[in-house]
Amino acid sequence: MERLRDLDEAELLARVVPRYAATRGVVRDPAPVGPGDDAAVVAAPSGSVVATTDTMVRGRDWRDEWSTPQDVGRKVVAQNLSDVAAMGAAPTALLVALMADPETPVDWCLGLADGIAAAAAEAGAEVVGGDVSAAGPGQLVVAVTALGDLRGRPPVLRSGARPGDVVAVCGSLGLSGGGLALLEAGEGLQDDAAGAPRGRAVTGLVAYHRAPQPPWGAGLVASAAHAHALVDVSDGFVTDTGRVARASGVRVDLFGRVLREHFAAGPLTLALGEVEAMRQVLTGGEEHSLVGCFPPDVDIASLPGPAWVVVGRVRPAGDEGPVVTVDDEVPDAPGWDHFAR
Amino acid sequence: MERLRDLDEAELLARVVPRYAATRGVVRDPAPVGPGDDAAVVAAPSGSVVATTDTMVRGRDWRDEWSTPQDVGRKVVAQNLSDVAAMGAAPTALLVALMADPETPVDWCLGLADGIAAAAAEAGAEVVGGDVSAAGPGQLVVAVTALGDLRGRPPVLRSGARPGDVVAVCGSLGLSGGGLALLEAGEGLQDDAAGAPRGRAVTGLVAYHRAPQPPWGAGLVASAAHAHALVDVSDGFVTDTGRVARASGVRVDLFGRVLREHFAAGPLTLALGEVEAMRQVLTGGEEHSLVGCFPPDVDIASLPGPAWVVVGRVRPAGDEGPVVTVDDEVPDAPGWDHFAR
């Protein structure tokens, strides 16, 4: 098997960069300078650029037994572009840094590039540059930076929610967390049960955990609809919505019935049972769906693109402060923490 | 000693983010949205943004015995911003991702932030965002993305050099490579010889290797002077200049006498001897100085800011193709390669 140490840097790049060619031209304003010079030049037609970075570490953020390199590529793109979307921006460009043990198979790196390219092309972002670097034995780290354009509109911050706003979710909830719980329980990697209804549900959750499919473009839709606040679900629905509540100084009341019937019912409940399904809806991380707070006069049902589901209402912060409630109770919903785990 | 595992992510960020406050406002157009939301928003007054990423891995790109966390921070900023400068741009913003073993001392992370903030403030770039993530035992990786603005001018590419251009260098050559060679030989970490002339030279080289001081702002000067091509010295002077030669389809003739008298003489020769000094000038990496190819009518001596030294001339590519020569000979100057080392 060919490994990174068998190639020099130029040979590796000569194989990786063409994998990203599929992303050239998927963006409305292609980058004037792509890979190959000291730096890329990316169009920023709004006169500003949205920028964010997010990383994945083997053994922490993925396991090779569970995820293909294509999965890892898709996931790291989803993580980054959902942060761009959560500002109300359209993605424009990605930079990809890979720190890898020289014993890493070359095919793994090419698979990673394929996964990144596929997700980037779907989302409308070009891969414009990156870096490769040797790391120690067993180490494999992917660091991605995503850029986006606001299309002339102001950014949609976490701090803009106002009492009376309608709270809506675009995308799923709990699938990624549910898939992770199944993998940790040793389920979802065998295909033999995939034919049965629960088997199909398990497979779907695990697939979403491995390669999330957030609603590309929904951030732009929310911004065009004058959303007051936006956040993506990366650490858990209640945790991330709580960040909006705190930043805005408001209380967010969520409707338990909608969460149960729209998000927890179906595959999640089939695979995990009702109680665990609802727990994953409220606390599961890495879903990368969007939570928006919209002015009450916005007709949520008629927004273009993937559906937004009304899940709650923004209220003035009461005695309990800027909290999130489900059916008027503050849920016990710890989110993901990187170091305390 | 307090370690990362003793803090949750919010507590760590509450200590790190204020370290970057010194960089707020150092840029001409401050970022409309800094750290704390899903992503940052950075001003891009030219309607485009220069973007690059570069990483450092402990044990590969630095050793804890040789470098303080402040050194690592300064070095990773220099690496990134010299790539921005090499496009002819002014730096605007940095994003910093840290992947760290939870056993890493908190003080190391704060020192890294201080080094990044100090170099960023000197260079005129704001730290606008980042990411922290847990990594495996002993792992410590810093991934930085730098953004820049072209101030309304076109990017200065590697491919623009033309026969007749004057080749000039801004900054030093060989100091970083020389410092590394000394450290590898076990020299430069003791202060006892620092008083003697060679001791001072050794200390200077090692200090430059640990925390390069490239000429911030020189890229912008070159662009304003209508430089045809620019590159920064990251893998070695001849290697990087060779990239300009190949991209432009030209031959670059370097003047050995100038390189010897201006760059190799002095501390490099004092510390390493004449032969090794010249070898480091030609092949030493991580210097992050700039090499520019200017139209022949540009008065190099009168460029504002740090001095540019004329070191060569661009010629049409001859029978040997787009090569770099020193006194008409192609030098044997292998550059740095990440995986083949």
Image (tube, coloured by chain):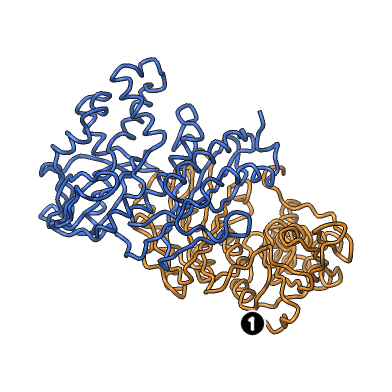
Chain colours: A orange, B blue
SS label for mark 1: loop
Residue drawn at (75%, 59%), measured in percent from left and top? A178
Specify the amino acid type for callout 1: Pro
Quadrant for the C terminus of chain B in the image = top left
Residue A150 is situated, as x and y percent measured from the top left of the image, at 54, 70
- Left or right of B262, for residue A35: right
- Between A77 and A4, the one lying in front of the other is A77
Q: Residue at x 44, y 38 (%)?
A: B61
Q: Against A314, is A10 above or below?
A: above
Q: Quadrant of residue A279?
A: bottom right
Along the line of sight, which residue is nearer the eye, B23 or A265?
Answer: B23
Percent across and percent down for residue B219 are: 32, 52
In the picture shown, does residue A14 fall above or below A227? above
Q: Chain of mark 1?
A: A
Q: Who is closer to the viewer here, B225 or B181?
A: B225
Q: Which is nearer the eye, B234 or A270?
A: B234
Image quarter of the N terminus of chain B: top right
Residue at the disc numbered 1:
A304
The spot of residue A230 in percent (x, y) is: 67, 67
| Rendered location of residue B4, percent (x, y) | 65, 37
- The answer to whether any part of residue A76 appears in the image is yes
In the picture, measured across the screen, residue B301 lies left or right of residue A63, that is left
